[in-house]
Image (cartoon, helix red, strand yellow):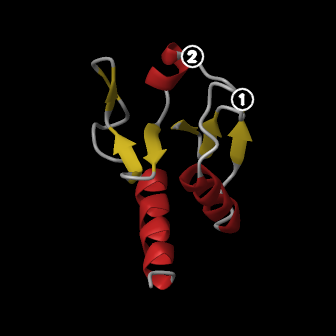
Amino acid sequence: NAYIVKDGKIITRKLSNDILHGSTRAAVLRFAKEAQMEVEERSFSIEEAQGADEAFTTSASAFVMPGVEIDGVQMGDGTPGPVAKRLREIYLDESRKSAV
């Protein structure tokens, strides 16, 4: 699943037949809300994504993976952004707590 961050707000598409209803996505959105991060579920264009402050993806294998460019266009300063880094930290911490 893909996410962008604009002015501190996390934007990701609403669940549909085109979006995987995964447990990683659900967990990341829950963690974001618990951390008082604003989340908006709606579509966004490639152009909007390229103009965003940061971008990241989520998956069961990579958890939260910050992106630094989209189709050759650099995101922000070209380094992983603070929102994605924080969500990755939270996700990994929570995963460690529940590890068997």
Q: Nearer the viewer, residue 96 or 84?
A: 96
Q: Amino acid at mark 1?
A: Ser
Compared across the picture, whether 77 is left or right of 14 comes to left
Q: Which residue is mark 1?
A: 16
- Which numbered mark, 2 or 1, is in the foreground of this view? 1
In the displayed structure, 56 sits above or below 34; it is above
Q: Secondary structure at mark 2?
A: loop
Residue 20 at what x, y percent from top left?
59, 37
Residue 92 at what x, y percent from top left?
42, 70
Q: Residue at x 47, y 36 (%)?
A: 53
Image quadrant in which the C terminus is located: bottom left
Q: Amino acid at mark 2?
A: Ser
Q: Which residue is mark 2?
A: 45
Q: Residue at x 64, y 67 (%)?
A: 35
In the displayed structure, 66 sits above or below 13; it is below
Q: Secondary structure at mark 1?
A: loop
